[in-house]
Image (tube, helix red, strand yellow):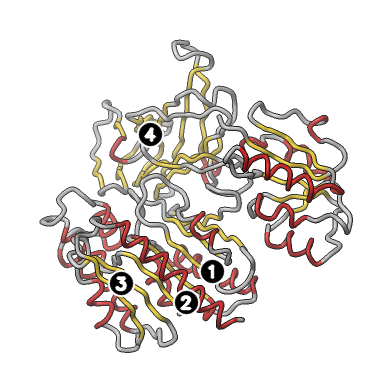
Amino acid sequence: MSKITLVQVGKNDLSEKYSMPDNVQWLVIDPENLSERIAQLNAEEKKQHRRLQFNMAFITDMDEKTDLMALDNFVAAYTVFYTDGIDAQTESQSYFFKKKMAKVILDKDMDEFMSNLGCKFFSGQYGDTAATNVGNYIINPSYKGEYKIEGGKYLVLDDDFGDDYYPIISNTYNIAGKEEIKLEFWIEYIKDPGVEIKLEFSRPANWYLDNELETWSIDGNNLNRPVILEGENNDKAMSLNIYIKGKGKIRLGNVHQRFSRINQGFFLNGGERIVDENRDELFYLFDPGDMKPPLNIYFSGYKSAEGFEGYFMLKKMKSPFILVTDTRLEGGSFYLGSKTLENGLVKAIREKLDWLGFTENQLILSGLSMGTFGAMYYGLTLEPHAIILGKPLLGVGDIALNGRLHRPNAFDTALDVMLARVGANNREAAEKLNDIFWDKFTNASLKNTTIYVAYMKEDDYDPKAFYNLTHKAEKIEKVIGHGYTGRHNDDSPSIVRWFLTEYQHVLNEFRGEES
């Protein structure tokens, strides 16, 4: 596993008290020499054509002369911590702590914080349902009851399963572990009160050919939060069995598996989760940037690997930003969901606007492909300064219908979205799914919002998106568009170049207004 570099600004080396994993490099820098030492380390990394980056910074000593801003370009938000008793003594130090969302570690919490550092502050992110989705479930051959599969969303059973836990599901493929990283699991299901569920994980206690297994079972209220597997042999492959008991109906969905950061966020440090009564999830990550307008929201496009998209792209813009990702179905569910999910995301965005002291006119929403639906859909509620779209997908029902002739078996996720939201897969259901967006669109008032759109002229997913965008709502006055020849995925590089160029144009224009 790659090295993790953690830096302590202080005088007493904590690594002498706490043991460090083999993959952790612990650097100690005297607060009096912070600027000089950081400059030296940066120069050394540049000579090796590498970028200086700390996975975490822990401040245990400082005074009014300590230049914390020397760390600014080398440590991310949510990865700066300080001990109880440390106080910012200058405006620069206060600014640094705020933009890094720094947190205090109390003495009573020190031991827990210093444990599993490699699991909390590793580089990168990962999650998927590859080994544990509805399509890869094996139903117990001895089960004689009826069941049905609802697209890629649920396996549905309705039966009397008995008073003891009955093994109903095994996964086709083993779950791959990774050394030095803990795995986190979340199962989607909806069940009657009379049904109970249990997850059982097992892996070799020693070597792969060893008959002795290390086994965990999780049930009841313990499934109401993400399950983090403890123990040894994290790099060993695991198998999963799902048990149920009781009487009634249960819809079993996918089991999400992710690299866990324990208590330091989802996917990336600081990542937040919105979960509803049906155990569906949305995730977002807020970065304060330079804390100057605007606040940029970016919705991830289709991605079968779970996690945030566009982090470094938004980071280069320097402004505050929020990344939003949808981990449901295969690649995402177009950010549509229950009132709990949708209202929760709008609430989170407004809370960050308030925290920054911004108005909704200091907000930009954006996305590519599937992410354009999220940007437009939530933009209709938030009424931002601008919405920037690349390859818009707005008629999700049309996308599902077009799959039959234009893209057979190429994007069945649209059918799953329709089944999950409307409850059917037919032309009438497609129209109802379209209407969820277009009814909201025609009643929207975006008179102060400019919409920028790059679209494919022969788009085979949603060919009418740009036309509908410019003809279905009289109140939307400003739409700037540019069309490229080809189908939806024919010229992504040109779309991305346009997207970034227009984004920079909007930011420059916006910052000019503020100066």
Q: Residues within 10 Å of mark 2 (few under 14, many from 20)?
A: some
Q: Which mark is residue 436?
A: 3
Q: CA distance from mark 3 to mark 2?
A: 17 Å
Q: CA distance from mark 2 to mark 1?
A: 9 Å
Quadrant for the N terminus, please: top right
Q: CA distance from mark 1 to mark 4?
A: 46 Å
Q: Are marks 2 and 1 in contact (CB under 8 Å)?
A: yes
Q: CA distance from mark 2 to mark 4?
A: 50 Å
Q: Is residue 113 left or right of residue 156?
A: right
Residue 103 quadrant: bottom right
| Mark before the other along the chain sequence, 4 or 3 | 4
Q: Which mark is residue 349?
A: 1
| Residue position for label 2 | 382
Depth check: 141 or 103 in front?
A: 103
Which residue corresponds to the image point at 51% horizontal and 60% vertical from the top-left? 314
Q: Residues within 10 Å of mark 3 (few under 14, many from 20)?
A: some
